Image (cartoon, helix red, strand yellow):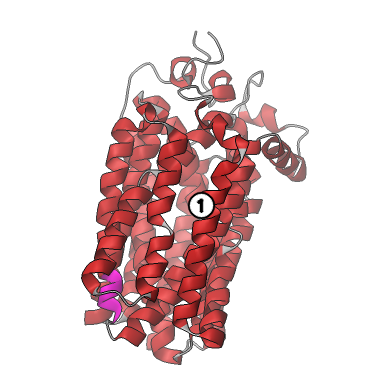
Amino acid sequence: MTATEPAAAAAGPPVRSLRPLAGVLAATAVSLTGTRISAIALPWFVLATTGSATMTGLVAFAEMAPYVLVKALTGPLVDRLGPRVVSWSTDAVSALAAGLVPLLHARGLLPFWLLLVMVAVIGAVRGPGDLAKSVMVPEAADRARVPLERATGLSGVTERLASTVGPAVGGGLVALVGPLAGLAVNAGTFALGSLLVALALPQGMGRPAVPAGAASPEESHQGGGYWQQFREGFGFLRTEPLLLTVIVMVGITNLLDAGFSTVLVPVWAKESGNGPAVIGLIGSVQGVTAVAGSLIAAALAHRLPRRTVFFVGFLVAGAPRFLVLALGAPMWAVVTVFAVGGFGSGFLNPILGAVLFERVPRHLLGRVHALGDSLAWAGIPLGGIVAGGAVTLVGLIPSLLTAGILYFATTTLTGLRPEWRDMDRLRGHASAAATERRGEPARS
C-alpha cells in the first residue's frame, strides 16, 4: 500500500456506508441554518432597539472574537477527545445560551452588557462545534467511498442551502413576527444538531485519529501535553506555503465580508427603506445560485483546474456586491449581482476544503484546521466594528466603495504569487492521511 492511495482503501470500513456522510451533512445543515437566521435577526434586533450602527458592530465583535479565539485553542482537544463528542456537547450549550436571549428580553432582564455576554458565550462554543463537524467530513468520505472533492462539494452544498433557507426564514420571521423569533429558532436548530451528532451517527464515528505507528489514541497522546500538540499543529502549518497564502487572502476577504453582512447591508436596507425582508431576499437569491455552483463543484470540481476556477469565483463573488449597493442600482440589478456572485462562491469552499484535507495528516487535522480557520477568521470580529465606525465617520456610500476596491485588489493581486501553482499537486491523494487510521486495524 503506497502513501498516495486513497485513505479509504487503507482505513475505511469493509462495507460502504452513506450514513456517516449524510449524518454529518444533516447536523451541519440545521446548525448553519439557525446561525444564518440569527445573522439577520440579531443585527436587526440591535438596530431596532439602539438605532446605532456602532453598537451593532460591537455585538458582532462580541460573538466572533470568542469564536475565533476559542476555535484556535481547541484544535488539540478535538484531536484528543474526538470530533463527535465535541460537536454534540458544544451544540447543546449553544442551544441553551441562544434560548436564554429571547427569554430574558421578554422578562425585561436583558441589558445591553448581558446581551454581549450571551452572544460571546454562543460564539465561544460555536467555534469548536463547527470545527468538529468539519473534521468529520474526510472520515465520512472514507466510509462513503466518495472522492474527497465530492464530499467537500456536498459540504459546500449544505452550507449554501443553509445560506439560502436561513436568510429567507430569518428575513420573514423578522418582518412578520420580530427578531426575537429568529433567535428562538436558532436555539432549536442547535439542539437538533446536537441530537443528530449524538444519536444518528453510527457507532465508532468521530473517534480520535491515530497516527501511523500508534496502537491507540491514548498511546498517540502519551508524552504530548496540550501546548506541545498545539505547537505541532502550528509547526506543520508553517511548512505549507500554499495554506499560509490562502489564510492571508481569505483573512482579508473575511474581514470585509463581515463588515458587509453585519453592518453595511443592514444599514443599506434601513436607509433605502427596503427593510429586513430585502436582506432575506438577496441572501436567499445568493444562496440559491451558490447551491447550484456547489452542486456543479461536487460533480465536476475534481476535473476542473482549481486555480482558474478559484480566482474567477472570487472575482464575481466579491467586489461587485459592494459596488452595486454603493451605486444605488435598481433592485433587479442588485438581485442579479448577488445571484451571479452566489454562483461563483459555490466553487470556493469545496476547493479550499479538498486542498486542506489532502495536505494535512488526519491526526493533526483538528489542530491545523483550527489554527488555519482562526487565522483566516481573525479579522471577522473587527469587520463589524470597522464597518460601523466607517459608516459613522464617512457615511454608507464611501464605506461600500472603499471596501469593494480593497476586495478587488485582494482577490486579484494575490493570485500572482507562485504558491498557487501547488493547488493541484496532491489532487486525488490523501497525503499523509493515507497512513493513519481511527483506532481500526490496518488493512492492506
Residue for badge 1: 411
Number of residues whose C-alpha sits closer than 10 Å to that of mark 1, classed few (under 14), some (14–19) or many (20 or more): many
**Residue toward you, 58 or 278:** 278
Does residue 38 appear anywhere in the picture? no
In this image, 418 relative to 44: left or right?
Answer: right
Q: Quadrant of residue 406?
A: bottom right
- Residue at screen point 54% across, 25% down: 425
Q: Position of residue 181 (x, y in %)?
A: 30, 76
| Above or below, comparing residue 270 to residue 97 in the picture | below
Determine the residue positioned at 75% across, 41% down. Answer: 231
Residue 261: x and y in percent read 42, 69
**Frontmost residue, 230 versus 279:** 279
> Is residue 277 a member of the stretch shown in magenta?
yes
Secondary element under disc 1, as helix, strand or loop, is: helix
Q: Is residue 336 left or right of residue 421?
A: left
Q: Is residue 114 magenta?
A: no
**Residues in magenta, as a range:** 275-280
Q: Nearer the viewer, residue 435 or 161?
A: 161
Identity of the residue drawn at 59% across and 23% down: 432
Picture quadrant where residue 163 is located:
bottom left
Location of residue 437 with respect to 53 vertically, above or below? above
Residue at position x 50%, y 76% in the image: 399
In the image, residue 319 above or below residue 47:
above
Q: Amino acid at mark 1?
A: Thr
Residue 371 place in picture, x, y as percent: 63, 47
Q: Locate residue 118, reporting x and y percent.
A: 52, 74
